[in-house]
Amino acid sequence: MYLNVSTLITIIATLTYGVIFTLVMVSKPLNRLKKVFAFYMLTMSVWSVSAFLTISGLVNVLVWFKVMTVSPLIGTVAIFFFVQTLFGLRRKWALYTILYGILVIYITLFTSIAVHSASLDQTGQLQYELGQYFLVLATPAYSLVLLSLNDLIRGFYRTRDAQHRNRIRYLIIGLSITVIGTLTNFTPIGRYPFDIAATGVTALLIAYAILRHQLLDIRVVVRLGLLYSITTAVFGLVYYVTISLVINLFQLISGKGVFFVSILVGTLTAFLLSPLRNLAQAWIDRIFYRDKYNAEKMLQRLSETTASLLDIKKITRVILSEITETLHIEHGAILIKNIESGKFQVISEIGEEKYFPAGFRADHPIVLWMTNKNQLLNRNELIMRPAFKSMWQEEKDELEKFNAQLFLPLNSKGDLIGIIVLGKKLSFQPYTQDEQLIFSTLANQTAVAIENARLYDELRGSFIQTVIALANAIDIRDTYTNTHSQQIASLAAKTARALGCSPEEVNEIHLGGLLHDIGKIGIPDTILQKPTKLEEAEWEIVRTHPKLGAELISPIKRLAGVSPMIESSHERYDGLGYPSGIKGDDIPLGARIISVVDSYSAMRDKRPYKEPYECDQIIDELKRNSGKMYDPRVVEAFLKIMQNGDKELP
C-alpha cells in the first residue's frame, strides 16, 4: 500500500462527501432538489473512493482508474439536473443527458476506447494512457458543466437574497475548481494529483456552504468541540501517514531501529503539527463562527478604544461605526438623555441616509418601558405590546421611516442614560439570540463609557467655571469690565482655529486667554488702578506679572501646557519683549496669539489717559508692527476675523 499526500486528500474528500451525503439524506423534507444533490454527492464519493483505491495500490489499478475516470463525467449529469431543479428550469433535451450518462458508463468501464492502460510504477506514481476518443466522450460532460455554471451565475445576479447568493457563490466556486482540476488530466501535469486536490477543496467548500449558509436549507447544529475533534482526527491521520512514509524510506532498519525511528519521527511531527492544529482551530472560529468571532473582536476593540476617549460624540460615533460594519447593519442611531429636560436626543447617527429628528420625550412609551424593564426591545414587541399604542402618530411615522428593528437601553447605576436604535441587517435576516446577548454586553460597555465621559465633562465644566471666576476676579481689579479675559480667550481660540490648530491646542489657547493676566494678582492695587501713566519703577513691577502668573499655575497638571503661554504672552516677535526676551517661533504659538488679541483689546479700551482707537487705526497699528511686535501669520489670521465683522469683537 502506498501512503502519501494524494491518498490523504482522497481520504479527507471521501469522508467529507460521505458526511454531506448522509446529512442530505436524513434532512427533512427530502425533496427532489435534495435527492438530485445527494446523487451528485454520491458520484463525488465514488470518485474519491476510486481515486484512493487506484493510487493506494491495494486493488486492480486499471479497473478502479476507469471508475475514477467515469465518476466525474456522471457527476456533470447530476450537477446539471441539480441546477435545473434549483432554478425551476425545464429543458426539453434534458432526458438525453441520462442516455449520455449510461453510454459513458458502458464505454468507459467495459471497453478500452476511453482508457487504454493504468498502473503504478515502482515509486507509486500513477501512469495512465487515455484513449484517442476520450476527449470526444468527455466534451458533452464539460458542456453540461459550462451550462450549469452559466445558470448559476445568472441565478446569482438575479436573486436579491444575500443568504441565497452566498449559497450559489460557493457552488460556483466549487464547481469551477472541480472543472479546472479535471482539465489538468489532459496536460503534462496530469500525473500530479491536481484533480484529487480539487475534489477535496470542493468537498470542503460545499460542507462550509451547508454549515455556514444552510445550503439546501439544511440546518446543522455543530458544536465547537465536534469541529475541534474532527481537526484533531485529521492531524492524527497526517501524523500516522508521516510516520509510515518515513519508515518506508528506511526499509533497511528493523527491530529496535524501527522503534527508535518511530519515536523520533513521532516526537518531531507532534512538535511541528501542534501549532498548526491550534492555527486550524483558530480558523474554525473565524470561518464557522465568523459572526460571533467578529463580534467578540469588536467588543475587545471597543473596550480598548472607548477607555481612552472622553468625548461623548466621539465615543458614540466609534461605537455605531463598529456595530454597523461588524454586524452588517444598515443604519443606527444613539440617543442621549438631556439631564435638564429628561428628553432623549440623537447625538450620533450612521449608515444609510435616515433621520431621527425629534428623539424621544421623557414620557415616551419606549423610554418608560426601558426605564422599568431595562431590556432589549425588538420591532415585533413594539408592534404587539399595548403599552406602545399611546405613541403619537408623528413618533410612529419617524420609527417607521427609520425602519427601527432593535432598541438597546444604556443603563448606568439604575438610570436610563441613553438608547441605541438599530435598523435592519443588510442580509434581511432577523437578529439572533447570540447577537442580542452581544448587544447586551455592548450596551453595558457603552453606558459605562458615556457615563465616564459625562462625568469628565462635568469636572471639566466645573474647572472652566473656576478658571473663569478667577479670571473675572482679576479683571475687576484691573479693568472696567469683568469679561475682559473671556473676550481675549474667545478671540484667541477663534484665531487659533483660523491658523489650523487642533481642538486640543485651541482648548489650551482658550484657557491661556482666560488666565493670561492671572499674575496681576501679585501687583498692588495702587499700580493696577492708577488713573495716570505709570512710572518706570511701577512698570518694572508690572512686567513681573507674566512670570508670576506662570509660577502660580505651573503646579496644576491640567494647566501644564498653559503656563508657558502666560509667561511669554508679553514677548515680542523681534525679541524685545519681556520677561525673557525670546523671539520668533521660540515664543509659544498661544502666546503669540494672545499678544495680538490682547493688544487689540487694549487699543479698543477707553482709559482715563486715552480714547479708544478706531478700527482703521487698529488695523494700521497691527500691520505696522507685524514682524516686529507680532507674528505676521497671527496678524493676518486676526485681521481676517476683523474684516469678517465677528460679533465678539468689541
Image: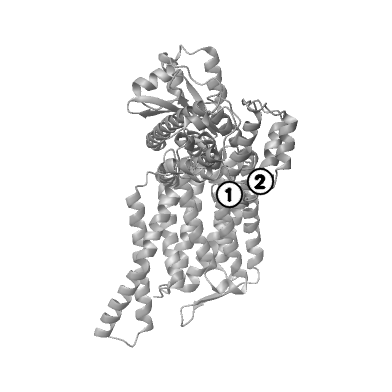
The location of residue 326, given as percent across then percent down, is: 49, 42
Q: Secondary structure at mark 2?
A: loop
Q: Which mark is residue 631?
A: 2
Q: Residues within 10 Å of mark 1 (few under 14, many from 20)?
A: many
Residue in view at x 37 percent, y 81 percent: 248
According to the picture, the residue beneath numbered tag 1 turns out to be 587
Earlier-in-chain disc, 2 versus 1: 1
Q: Nearer the viewer, residue 629 or 128?
A: 629
Which amino acid, mark 2?
A: Asp
Neighbor class of circle 2 (other Cα within 10 Å; few <14, some 14-19, many 20+) is many
In screen coordinates, is 157 left or right of 235?
right
All told, the count of numbered labels is 2
Q: Is residue 340 above or below residue 649?
A: above
Say if 95 sits above or below 328 in the image.
below
- Quarter residue 155 falls in: top right
Q: Amino acid at mark 1?
A: Ile
